């Protein structure tokens, strides 16, 4: 038996691992116990393979089994050695050319397992002097070795950071980082991304409690364009104040709008190229364009509403330059309520 390695003229010899070392390896590999009646032969190459190399174990002709059967020809078992030990930095970005999104985590990923204690010695430092400690994900909380660590945000916007690694960090095979000279690594955050977030694609508002549809805004135009239509209006005012008694015809219209809102794409208006009669209005950014704030869109009359927000800044950040991004939702303003009493459900209308 031997190993054939791409790039090496001579084959690499093997040794059979036995005794206590064999038992320790199998115990570490099978923490729940070694599978019964499974024969194991542990082999070790007599030299280290090159990184990311094509390797084949040549199982020679004439190998004798316990039953006395011999192999009639060579058997080739191909595999590939793992790559060099390196680490890569990553963070969510609005586009490949921009810096990190400051509200989301930054992470380091290793190509091979690293002792958890050593990996967590990595530190993220801002240019202002503040530090963030490394953490592991939930899956790695109890693992002795990890391959990914994270720095949890939020971080200051438009700021430089240095990612520092322990100089002597090594993987489970004792290999040192091949790209250790990149650290401390300098990274940068962008400003907080634009945001126009509605609670959901559908909601219910109490008609007798000054109903307003909340929308969360950040880093948008000082006045955000929006459109609104009310199902059944303007053709018919029968729904006014009577939404819990809506006719079957209007229920069909509501369901159609619910489907359109649920399937809406951010690049296109939910109202289409031939929109119904809508009421256009502005959503003022009371604390300025960059402020993070929640603004209410008043929906004073009972009925089913479809509301859509359009933003050039959202479009530029998430779709492309000179694009509009649309954020739609729907809401039912009603005085219909449902309460639970024991095992029964009782509708109530005040």
Image (cartoon, rainbow, N blue to C red):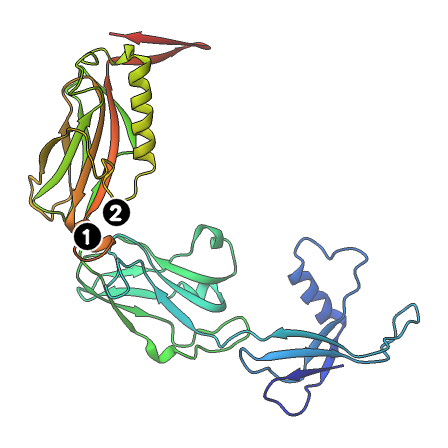
The quarter of the rendered structure image containing the C terminus is top left
Q: Which secondary structure lies at badge 1?
A: loop
The quarter of the rendered structure image containing the N terminus is bottom right
The residue that appears at 59% across and 88% down in the rendered structure is: 7
* Position of 79 relative to 311 (above/below): below
Circle nearer the N terminus (1, 2): 2
Is 153 left or right of 72, judged from the image as shown? left
Q: Residue furthest right?
A: 68
* Position of 70 relative to 141 (above/below): below
Q: Which residue is more in the foreground, 166 or 188?
A: 188
Q: Is residue 192 visible?
A: no
Dot 2 corresponds to which residue? 267
Image position, residue 2 (x, y; %): 72, 83
Q: CA distance from mark 1 to mark 2?
A: 8 Å
Dot 1 corresponds to which residue? 323
Q: Which quarter of the picture shows residue 5?
A: bottom right
Q: Which residue is more in the foreground, 95 or 82?
A: 95
- Marks 1/2 in contact by CB < 8 Å: the verdict is yes
* Position of 274 relative to 231 (above/below): below
Image position, residue 101 (x, y; %): 25, 57
């Amino acid at each position: 038996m031997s190993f054939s390695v791409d790039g090496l003229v001579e084959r690499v010899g093997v040794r059979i691992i036995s005794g206590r070392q064999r038992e320790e390896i199998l115990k570490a590999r099978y923490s729940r116990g070694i599978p019964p009646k499974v024969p194991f032969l542990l082999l070790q190459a007599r030299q280290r393979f090159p990184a990311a190399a094509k390797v084949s174990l040549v199982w020679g002709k004439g190998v004798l089994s316990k039953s006395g059967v011999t192999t009639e020809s060579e058997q080739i078992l191909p595999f590939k050695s793992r790559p060099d030990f390196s680490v890569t930095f990553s963070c969510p970005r609005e586009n490949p050319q921009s810096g990190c999104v400051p509200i989301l985590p930054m992470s380091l990923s290793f190509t091979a397992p690293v002792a958890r204690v050593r990996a967590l010695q990595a530190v993220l430092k801002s240019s202002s002097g503040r530090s963030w400690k490394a953490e592991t994900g939930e899956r790695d909380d109890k693992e002795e070795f990890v391959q990914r660590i994270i720095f949890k945000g939020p971080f200051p916007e438009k700021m430089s950071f240095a990612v520092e690694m322990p100089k002597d960090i090594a993987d489970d095979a004792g290999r040192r980082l091949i790209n250790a000279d990149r650290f401390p690594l300098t990274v940068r955050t962008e400003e907080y991304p634009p945001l126009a977030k509605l609670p959901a694609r559908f909601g219910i508002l109490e008609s007798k409690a000054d109903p307003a549809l909340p929308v969360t805004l950040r880093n948008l135009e000082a006045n955000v364009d929006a459109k609104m239509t009310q199902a059944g209006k303007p053709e018919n005012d029968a729904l006014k104040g009577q939404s819990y008694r809506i006719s079957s015809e209007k229920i069909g219209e509501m369901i159609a709008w619910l489907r359109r809102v649920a399937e809406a794409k951010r690049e296109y208006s939910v109202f289409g190229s031939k929109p119904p009669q809508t009421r256009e209005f502005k959503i003022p950014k009371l604390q300025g364009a960059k402020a993070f704030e929640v603004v209410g869109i008043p929906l004073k009359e009972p009925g089913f509403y479809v509301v859509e927000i359009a933003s050039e800044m959202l479009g530029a950040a998430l779709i492309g330059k000179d694009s509009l991004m649309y954020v739609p939702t729907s809401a039912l303003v009603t005085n219909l309520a449902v309460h639970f009493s024991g095992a029964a459900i009782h509708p109530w209308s005040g």
